[in-house]
Amino acid sequence: MTAIAMRLAGGAAAMPLLEGLGWGFCAALIWGGYLAFARAGVVGGIAPLDFALLRYGTAALLVLPVLPRLGLRDLGGIGWRRGAVLALLAGPAFILLATWGYRFAPLAHGAVVQPAVVTIATMALAVLLLRETIAARRWLGVGVVIAGLALVSGAGMGNAGAWKGDLLFAAAGLLWALFTIACRAWRVDAWHATVAVAVLGGAAIIPVWLWLGDAPALAAQGWSVIATQALVQGALSGVLAVFAFGRAVVLLGPARAAMFPAMVPALAVLAGIPVAGEWPEPVQWLGLTTVLCGLPLAMGLMARR
């Protein structure tokens, strides 16, 4: 009986681990797919403003019913002023920069530059603004990441304007890093931040799109393409991925959950082969591998126990 009880206890203890791994991989897979579908959409003629509408318009419709439960008066405890700041950082401006970059640079650039800049900028801002202490080995990882970025970006320098795309990707990554720091400083959980960004982002982008958007051009993409992008950009990336990552953090802890963003570059590049039809150059594979080796070190996943 004792042996059976021990087995049952061990199995019960393993369930949160398995569930956390499942949620974390779900988030990473969605983020990788979002980058690949964004590149495919831009190549297919979808404008960055259309992406902003599909992402935040869809996300707003999905989360709007729960807003009254969180509290309309203070936006679920966040406050409308802070919610507006979060929406400014992780809202339409972010997706406009992230998709605009694909007009100049290929998928491999966006798949590597955005997640890497998020990691590096978040670390630097945490030191400067939150007074956190970061071990020297993590800064060594930052150096490895920068070297990988140089390989990935350098391979595309023959493409006219590729550097412009890299700058746009970096700007998008910086906005997300600022969003992360703001959430940490204000102690805003992932779900409340998602609701605030979705609602305020949707409220901001819908009138702008009605004023400046090209409805006939978007409609010409076909309803299947529009529905697919709305699903990937809005429902999956804008809502489900954030919730999934939040669950992974709860079940696994921040250190273990931090491995999932490190998977995004590889998943995005792999997803881009069937979705966007893009194969990275050999030197970009090397750069991607270098970044993937540096990211876990930069995030402290290889620290001594």
Image (spheres, rainbow, N blue to C red):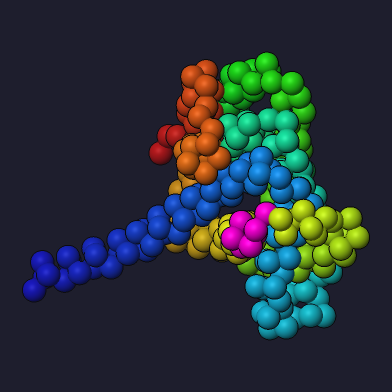
Quadrant location of the N terminus in the rendered image = bottom left
Q: Is residue 301 visible?
A: no
- Which corner quadrant of the image does residue 21 belong to? bottom left
Q: Main secondary structure of the magenta part?
A: helix
Expressed as whole percent of the image width and height from the top left, the position of residue 10 reads 23, 63
Say whether residue 281 is magenta: no
Q: Which residues are magenta?
A: 221-227
Percent from the top left, x then y, of residue 69? 68, 83
Question: Against 114, is 150 above or below?
Answer: above
Residue furthest to the left: 1
Would you place residue 78 above or below residue 236 in this image? below
Q: Quadrant of residue 74?
A: bottom right
Q: Quadrant of residue 197?
A: bottom right
Name the residue at 52% across, 18% down.
Answer: 283
Residue located farthest toward the bottom when viewing the structure as drawn: 69
Q: Check the image and name the residue furthest to the right.
A: 211
- Between 132 and 80, the one lying in front of the other is 80
Instruction: Report the residue at 67% width, 79% height from top.
Output: 66
Residue 300: % across, % down:
52, 37
Task: Looking at the picture, tell me which residue is in the foreground, 76 or 235.
Answer: 235
Say which residue appears at 67% left-offset and 54% top-offset. 221
**Whether residue 149 is situated above or below residue 13 in the rendered picture:** above
Residue 124: x, y in percent?
70, 35
| Nearer the observer, 101 or 7 | 101
Q: Is residue 226 magenta?
A: yes
Left or right relative to 139: residue 16:
left
Q: Residue at x 40, y 58 (%)?
A: 22
